[in-house]
Image (cartoon, coloured by chain):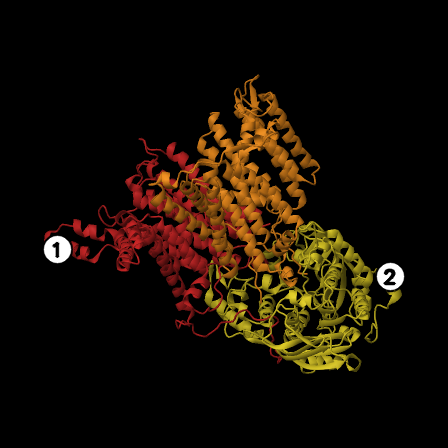
Amino acid sequence: MENKTALNSGKATNMRSRLTLGIVLIAIGLLIVLLFGLGLQAGMKSTFGLSPLDDKYVIPIPALVLPAQPAIYILALIAVFAGAWQLARGTRSSTALVGVVAFCFVSSFLIWATKGKSMDLVGTMNTSLVRATPIALAALCGVISERAAVVNIAIEGIMLVSAMTSVIAATVAHNLYIGLLAGILTGMIIAALHAILVIQFRVDQIISGVAINIIGTGISSFISKRFMQANIDQLNNSGIFPNIPIPFVVKIPILGPVLFENNFIVYIMLILVAIIYVLLFYTPWGLRTRAVGEHPKAADTLGINVYLTRYVNVILGGLIAGIGGAYFTIGSVGRFEKLMTAGKGFIGLAAMIFGNWNPIGALGSSLIFGFADSLQVKMQILETPIPSEFLQMAPYIVTIIVLAGVVGRVHPPAADGTPYEKQ
Amino acid sequence: MKGKAAKPQAETPLPKAASKTKGKLGVNSKILQTLLIPALAVFTSFIIGSIVIVISNKAAITTYRNFFSAPGAAFMATWNAIFTAYGALFYGSFGSIPELFQGIKAYFATGDTKPLILAIYPFTESLATVTPYILAGLAVAVGFKCGLFNIGAEGQFGIGALCSAFVGYSIKGLPWYLHLPLALLAGAVGGAIWGAIPGYLKGLTGAHEVVNTIMMNYISFRLSDWLLNGPMKATGYRPVTPVIENSAMLPRFFPDPLRFNWGFFLALAVTVFVYWFLFKTTIGFEIRTVGANPAGARYAGMSVVRNFVIAMTLSGALAGLAGATQVLGIDHWVGQGFSAGYGFDSIAIALLGQSHPVGVVLAALLWGTLRSGATRMQSLAGVPIEIISLIQGLVIVFVAAPAVIRWIYRIRAIGAEQIILTRGWGG
Amino acid sequence: MPMVLELRGISKSFPGVLANDAIDLSVEKGKILALLGENGAGKTTLMNILYGLYKPDKGQILINGEEVAIHSPSDAIAHGIGMVHQHFMLIPVMTATENVMLGVEPVRNGIFLDKTKVAKRIREISKQYNLEVDPDAYIGELPVGAQQRVEIIKVLYRQAEILILDEPTAVLTPQEVEGLFKVLRFLVADGKSIIFITHKLKEVLAVADRIMVLRGGQVVGTVDAKEASQEKLASMMVGREVNLVVKKKPATPKGAVLNVKDLYVRDERQNLTVNGASFDVRAGEVLGVAGVQGNGQTELVYALTGLCPVVSGKISIMDKPVYHSSPRNVLERGVAHVPEDRQRHGLILPFPVHDNMVLCTYYQPPFAKGVALQQKTIIETSEKLADQFDVRTPNVFVPVSTLSGGNQQKVIVAREFSRPIKLLIASQPTRGLDVGSIEYIHSRIIEKRDEGTAVLLVSPELDEIIALSDRIAVMYKGQIVEILSAEKINKAYLGLLMAGVKPYEALETVPATIQETEVERVF
C-alpha cells in the first residue's frame, strides 16, 4: 500500500496548538464580558418567547426570562473556564470545548441584543430551520457527489436555474408539484452536464463547476430580464407551498412549532437527510459509492463500474439540488429574482465540509448557517445598533471561520477531486 | 562510471506520447494548436449564443410558426436577428468605417471635431474598457500559476476601487504626480489585503480558496453597500462616492466624451512587470513551482505557505489596481454594483489567455471589446447584456475542456493540455 | 488433462511501447508458476490482461481448455481468477469485512448490508488456509502483512481457483515471506493454481514449480525450478552477465557528520513512527538502514531533511543542531537528498530539465543575482551536468516528464551530487529502475562515499543494503534495533531483527555473520 505520509508544513506541535486554543477560548470569554456584559443596567431582563404567539396548535409554555447581566457573566465564566481547562489539561475533544464556548458567545450576544425587550426564540429556531433548508439540500447534493469523489461547485448555478424553471412551470401549470418536478429535472440535467464534462472529458472539476455557475447565472438573468419581468402573471407568479402542520406532534412544546409546522420542501429535506444517511452507510449502493470515492482503483478491480457510479451520484445530487433551487421560489417567495440564491450553494459546500461529508453532520452545520442567516433579520427587528449590512455579512464570515477551523479535522473522501483513468 | 547500460526500459506504460499524425484540419504544430483551440472556443460559443439570440427574438419566433409554409422567411428572420445582434455588437465595439471617413472629411472640411470624435468613440471606449480587464485577468492568471483559483477578483476589484476613490476625493490640494500614484497605490493595497486573507488562510489551514474568496466577495458587497450608504456617501440621495479630485484622475488623451486614458499603458507596463516577475525572478520561479507541484516545491526548500500568500496578495493587488484604474480613469466615482461581472470575466480571460501575460492581454482585448459593444447590442438590438455571461461561460468550458472542441471539430491532441486546479478540500 | 490456464499469443502495446509480444503461458492445476523479470518486462501488464483490466490486442485465454472472453474484472472473477495487486486494493477507512464484501454484498431484507454473514465466512477461510485476520479491524490500522492476508481472503471469498500474486513479498520481512509460502502450500494442496510475479531470484527458486522469464515483453524461456540456478535466471532476465555484487574498496571513515540522538517523530495521525532512534553516520562511510517499509524509515528521512516536525530528540550535522529546521536550512548545511518518491518530491514534472537541475540552488549565485534569475548560466550548467551524469535527453528544454525513470533519477542525482555536500541521504534510490541505471547510481554513491561524504542509505531491498553499506542499522517499529558491520553479514540474522526479534534472541538461532550464502528451499 502506498505510503501516503503528508509533509507537515510546520503545523504547530500538539503543545503549541493546545496553548493557542486555550488562550483563544479565554480571550473569547473576556470578549463576552467586554462586548456584552459591561455597561448593562442592572435589573435589565431579556425575554425569550418559547411559544409563538399566533400558534393555534402548540401547548403554550411560559417564556424564558433571564436577568441580562448575571446571565452574561455566567456564560463568560463558563467560556473562560473552558479555555483554562484547555490550557492546563487539554482534552481529547477540543471540538466540544469550542462548541461550548461558541454557544456561550452566541447566547450572550442574544441576551445582550434582547435586553429590555423580548425575542421569539422558538420562531427564530423555526426560521433557522427554514433558512437552513436550501443550504442543507445543497450540502446533501455535495455529500452524494463528493462521496463518489466528484467535486461539484456548480450547486449554486444548478439551484439558480432550478429556481427559475420551477417557478415558470408552476405558474404555467398552476400546480406547485409540477413546478417541483421541473426543478428536479433541471437539476438532473445540469448535473449530468457537469458529470459528462468531468468524467468523460476530464475537465478540471472546479473549472467545470465555475463555468456552469457562470452559464447558469447568465441564462437565468437573461431569461428573467427578457421574458419574466414583462410577463409576471404568466411566468413568474406561482404561489408557494403552504405550511402543513403534522397532527399530534405539532403540539409538543418547542419542538412542535419548530419541526412539525413547515412546508413540503422542508419536510422533504428532513426525510432526505435520514434516507441518504441510511443508504450511504447501510446499503450496497452506499458501500460502493464510498469505495469509489476512497479508492476507485480498488473498486474497479472488484468489478464495480466507477464511471457509472459517479454519473449516478452526480445526477442524484443534481436532483436534490433541484429541490433546493425550487425552494427559493415555490417554497419561499413565489417569484424569481436575478441572483436570488446569494451564495447559498457555496455555503452548502462549507456545511458539507463542516459536517464531515456526513448527511446528519451536514444538516447540523446547515442549521448553524441558517441560524446566522435568521439572526440578521431578527437583529434588525430588535433595532440592534449594528448596521444591517454587517449583520448580512454574518453567514459569510461564519463560513470562513468554520472552514479555517475544521480543515485537518475532517476527512474528505480520499479520491475527492481526482478524475479516474482506466488504462 | 558512465557504463554502457542496457537500453532503459519504461517501468510503466508511457503517457499518451506526442502523436505526430495530422488531424482532419491538418493541424500539426503545438503553437498553432495553442492559438486554434481558444479561437475555436470563442467561435463555437458565439454560435451557441446566436441560437439563444434567435430563440429570444420575438420576430424570428413568429416566422418559425410558419416554417413549413414560408421557410425563407424563417431563415431571413434568423439571419436578421443574428446579424442585427452581432452587428450591433461589432458597431458598439469598433464603430463603423463609413462614419470614420465622414468624421475625417468633416474635420478637414470645417475643423469640426465632433463627428470624428463620435466615430472613434466606440473604439476608444473599447480600449478604455480593456484596461481593467488586462489587470483583472493578470490577477487571476497569477493565481492560476500558483495553483490557486482566485474567484475573489470581483471583491478585490471593488475594495480597490473604494480605496482609490477614497484617496481620490478625500485628499485635497496635492499635486497630480503625488496624488495619482497614491490613489493607485491605495487601490492596489486594498485589493492586496483582500486577497492576502484567503491566501493566508489557505497557507495556514489549508482551507480551500474557492469558497473563501467567494465569501470574501459577498462580504465586500455588503461592506461597500454600507460604505456607499454611510461613511463614503456623497451628498444627495444616490449611494455613490463623491467625485474624485482632478489631481487623482488618470489623464486622458482626447477631449470628452472620449475616455481613453493613461490607464491602458499603465496596464501594459504592469503586464511587462508581471512577465518579468513570473519568469525571470526567483520568487516567480517559486510561485510557478508551487503551482506545478507543491510537494516537490517543499522538497526543494521552498515555503509553500509563503508563496501562496505572495501569489494571492499579488493577485489581489492586481485586481485592486484594476478597480483603481476604472475609478481614476473612467468613472471618477464609485457606485453600487461597480464591480459586477469583473470577477467572472477575469476568470474567462485568464483561462483564454492560458495564464500567460501575453495571452491575457490578447484575451482582455477581445473581452473588453465585446463587453463594450454589448451595451450597444442591448440598446440597439434589444438583446439583454446577460447573453455575454452565457457566451463567457461557454468559452470557459471550451477552453478548459479542449477535448470537447477537438471532439466537435475532429482535431487530434498534441501533448498534455489539462489545467489542474482541484486538489481536494485540504483535509 | 488440459492446463487449468493457458494464454496463447497475447500481445499488447501502449503508445511507444510494446508491453507484451505474443506471449504463451500455461499453468497446471495445483502448481505454482513464477513469472520472473525486471521492472518493465511486461509481467504486470500480462496479468492485468488476464484479470480483465487491460484488453489484449491479440491472443486468447483458455481456462480448462475452453476459450473465454475476459473484458473486465467481473468476468475474471466469474471465471475463478483472483488477483492480489502489488499495491493493495484496500480501502483504509473501511473494515476488512467491508473490503472483502465489496461488489458481492449479501443483503438482508432486500437492501441492508449483511455484514455478519460475511464476517462468518471470513473466519472460515481464515481457519482453512492459516490466514489470520480480524474481520472488524480497520484496514488502515492493520500491519502490512495482515493487509495482504485480507487481500488473499478477498480473492478466496470469491471462490478463485487461479490466484495471481503480484510482487507479494515486496513489503514482507523474510520471516513473513516464509509464512506466505506456507499459505501458498495450503492453497496448492487444496487444488488452487498460483501465478507468482516477482523480480527476486531467490524467492523464485524457493517456491515455484516452474519459472517463466520475461524480458522486454517477450518470453525468454521457461524452466523447471529444479533445473534452474540464480545465475542462469539472472542472465535470462537481463540478457547478459550481471554483477550481483558491487565492487568497492573498504571504507575509511572519519569523524561523524550526522548525529541522531533519541529521535521521536509523529506522523499526521499522531502515531509515534520514530520511537527513540539513535545513530550516527561518519564521513566516508555508507550507513544502510534496513527494515521493512512502514517501520518509520520514511518519517526518519523526513525529519532529517526538515520536512516534518520533530517531537523530541537531537539531530546535529557537523555538531551543529538541526532541530525544527526548514528544508532549505538543511539543504544549506550541505545535505543532499535523493527522495523516495522521485516524481512527487524530487522533480517538477511539467518543468524543463534545466529548471529541475537548479531546483535546490536557483536562488544562489551564480544562478541568481538578487531576485533575477540568470537563465544563461542555468542552461549552460544544466547541459554540463546532463553530460557529466549520463542523462539521456534530447536537450535540457524538454519537460522532465518525457524522460525515462532512470534518466529522471539521474537528473536528481546530478542535481544533488553536483553541490558541495557533506551528507547524502538516499531513500530507495533505485526503485523501479532498469539494471543499467541501478548499476550507475550504485557506483556514483560509492564514489561519493570515497570522496569523504557521509551516506545514509534507506532501502527495503535488503540486497541493496548489504551490497552498498559499510555498516547496517536495522529499524523496527521506529527504533534502531542494532547497528553492525556489513562485512559477511548473515541475511537471515538481519531478517530476524527486521521482524522484531531482539538481537540476543536472534543470535540463538542464527549467527550474525556467515562464510557463504546459501539458498533455502521451503518445500
Instruction: Identify the subunit bearing mark 1.
Output: B
Residue B117 falls left or right of residue C490: left
Q: Which mark is residue A395?
A: none
Rendering coords of residue A385 (x, y %):
47, 26
Q: Quadrant of the C terminus of chain A?
A: bottom right
Q: Find the residue positioned furthest to the front.
A: B69
* Relative height, residue C385 to residue C291 (above, below): below
Callout 2 and callout 1 share a chain: no
The span from disc 2 to disc 1 (Cα, nearest Å) is 108 Å
Dot 2: within a 10 Å radius of its alpha carbon, few (fewer than 14), some, or many (20 or more) residues? Answer: few
Please identify the quarter of the rendering in which residue A3 is found: bottom right
Rendering coords of residue C261 (x, y %):
74, 55
Secondary structure at badge 1 equals helix
* Relative height, residue B355 to residue B151 (above, below): below
Secondary structure at badge 2 equals helix
Q: Are marks 2 and 1 in contact (CB under 8 Å)?
A: no
Visual hue assigned to chain B: red
Residue situated in front as seen by the camera: C483 or B383: B383
Residue situated in front as seen by the camera: A28 or C284: A28
Q: Quadrant of the N terminus of chain A?
A: bottom right
Visual hue assigned to chain A: orange
Residue situated in front as seen by the camera: B414 or B179: B414
Q: Amino acid at mark 2?
A: Tyr
Query: Which residue position is annotated with label 2?
Result: C504
Chain painted in yellow in the figure: C
Please identify the quarter of the rendering in which residue B105 is found: bottom left
Q: Which mark is residue B108?
A: 1
Residue situated in front as seen by the camera: C200 or C319: C200
Q: Residue at x 74, y 71 (%)?
A: C463
Rendering coords of residue B133 (x, y %):
36, 51
